[in-house]
Image: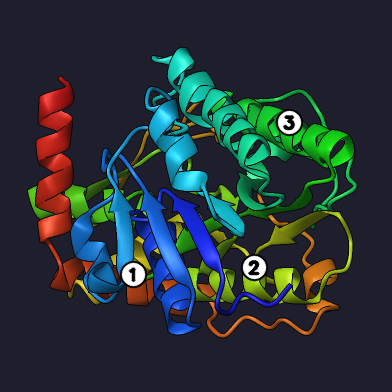
Amino acid sequence: MELKGKNVLVTGGAGFVGSHLVDKLVQEGNKVIVFDNLSTGNLRFLEESIDKIELVQRDLFSDKDDLDKAMKGVDFVFHLAANADIKLNLKEPLKCLDQNTIVTSNVLEAMRKNGVKDIAFSSTGSVYGEPKVHPTPEDAPFPVQTSMYGASKLAGEGLLQAYSEGYGFNVYIFRFVSLMGERYSHGCVFDFYKKLMQDYTQLEILGNGKQRKSYLYVKDCINAMFTVIENSKERLNIYNLGHDEFIEVTPIANLVCDELGLQDVKFVYSGGERGWVGDSPFIHLDISKIKKLGWKRTLSIEECVRKTANWIKENDWVVERECQNITRCH
């Protein structure tokens, strides 16, 4: 399917990933509706496209009538809205159910009622839990789920597959590794930056710092999604989106310190091979399937980290906003 000149609805379109997607869709000549409650998204992320889109500032969980209205005349849906905070989701387990699984059901029902049959879904490599095979392929057997986030996303995948089978939906499920790049406002580089701004002499690192993680540049991720949608002929599509490489957490901390011009920072480890419950010690997805379609990544993981740290440094309003949100939540 060619994504040009279409009516496209993007949930979570004001977020880190969603805003980059919106920019790309607008550049390709699509009419874009952004459905976002702005709980984690930010209108500053949409500065390049705000005058060319329709913004519906509503909630997918509670405002189903508004979602039904926004869905009228839509050709394609990108469902990116989610609660992605793995570290905190054990404190509020219903948040993952409501904001990941239930809202996915709401999106699918709004599509069914309005005759919309094409959807791309941002899933996660966390659905693999702690796999025994690395790099992990799409057809790897699912182990016990280790996080509420991964479990809620896997449930969403199940709903999408059922709607594909039952109602003929064309479904594109993308299992991401963690993403980095401009507009990044959640994750280890962001956390390291915040901690170093509070005390540049030492840095707390959760776990033992030896956790092995894979990351992907956000714009490479967007291009990968377009590659699949425009080239795959299947009704149900499941693709890992990741990187050939992986990196340990301590080297990430070193890169962030280097980009901030900090030397002799003392690293303090909380201990254990996991930073928190649900933190997989090794994440590395098999991306041979997406590469067969001709997609290639453009940045190394080190380049991703450096670009991300530099963007945060030049846009420290993101850190101030996040701190204000944390204060309000407590």
User: How much space separates mark 3 and mark 1, taking CA atoms?
Assistant: 34 Å
* Nearer to us in this view, 229 or 96: 229
Camera sees residue 24: yes
- Give the vertical position of 22 relative to 104 (above or below): below
Q: Nearer the viewer, mark 3 or mark 1?
A: 3
Q: Which residue has dot 1 on it?
A: 308
* Nearer to us in this view, 302 or 180: 180
Q: Which residue has dot 2 on it?
A: 225
Q: Nearer the viewer, mark 3 or mark 2?
A: 3
Residue at image point 66% right, 47% down: 125
* Few, some or many residues within 10 Å of mark 2 (<14, 14–19, 20+): many
SS label for mark 2 = helix
Check disc 3 and give the amino acid type. Answer: Leu
Q: Where in the figure is residue 159, as x and y percent of width and height?
A: 73, 31
Residue 159's disc number: 3
- Give the vertical position of 137 relative to 232 (above or below): above
User: How much space separates mark 3 and mark 2, taking CA atoms?
Assistant: 20 Å
Residues at circles 1 and 2 in contact by the CB criterion of under 8 Å: no
Residues at circles 3 and 2 in contact by the CB criterion of under 8 Å: no
Q: Which mark sits nearer the N-terminus, 3 or 1?
A: 3
Camera sees residue 84: no
SS label for mark 1 = helix
* Few, some or many residues within 10 Å of mark 3 (<14, 14–19, 20+): some
Check disc 2 and give the amino acid type. Answer: Met
